[in-house]
Amino acid sequence: MLKLLQGFFTWWNGATPGTFFDVGRRAALVGADDQGNRYYEERRPSIEGRKRRYVIYKGLAEGSKVPPDWHGWMHHTVMEPPTVAPLKRQKWEQDYQPNLTGTVRAYRPKGSLARGGVRAPAASDYQAWTPEDGAQS
């Protein structure tokens, strides 16, 4: 029951029924990615002459969850979706990872307060300014 109410009232936990209705009415499903996000393209071109493209996220609506190949298609960089013409992966490319900022799996460098460490003192001759130092008599 809670999931149903979240679907009606919170857009960030997935698409609302209104979004499903609107996108389903004017767009066709093009494909889905490995994370379960679904991609749509309008059936008719908009006023600008291009067909608008949509993503309905599975779960939290976070733009960094769109993989690079689908990102290129969404922004009209490539015309064919990855389901038709997959991007050629280079051997040096790493696997896609969504942005983890703000999560427990976020990167925390050595010395970060969030990591619980103590930052090493600076190796330079920097001394902080205080108002007493700058006072002229």
Image (cartoon, rainbow, N blue to C red):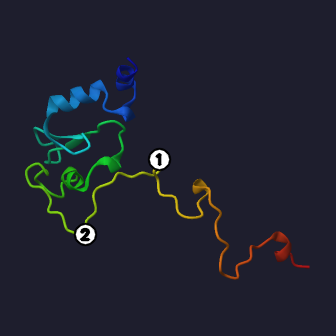
Nearer the observer, 91 or 86: 91
Position of residue 121 measured from the top left corner of the image (x, y, whole percent): 67, 73
Residue 85 is tagged as: none
Q: Amino acid at mark 2?
A: Trp
Is 77 left, or right, of 58 in this rendering? Answer: left
Nearer the observer, 49 or 108: 108
Q: Eyeballing the image, is 15 above or below 30?
A: above
Q: Quadrant of the N terminus?
A: top left
Instruction: Please report the residue visible at 24 percent of the width from the left and 53 percent of the height from the top.
Output: 71
Q: Amino acid at mark 1?
A: Thr
Which residue is farthest bottom? 125
Position of residue 130 measured from the top left corner of the image (x, y, whole percent): 80, 71
Position of residue 106 measured from the top left corner of the image (x, y, whole percent): 46, 53
**Are circles 2 and 1 on residues that touch, CB within 8 Å?**
no
Q: Eyeballing the image, is 80 above or below 26?
A: below
Crowd class of label 2 (few under 14; some 14 to 19; many from 20; radius 10 Å): few
Helix, strand or loop at disc 2?
loop
Helix, strand or loop at disc 1?
loop
Nearer the observer, 118 or 23: 118
Q: Give the spatial CA distance, label 2 vs label 1.
A: 27 Å
Q: Which residue is mark 2?
A: 92
Which residue is farthest top? 1
Q: Quadrant of the C terminus?
A: bottom right
Residue 103 is tagged as: 1
Position of residue 16 measured from the top left corner of the image (x, y, whole percent): 31, 27
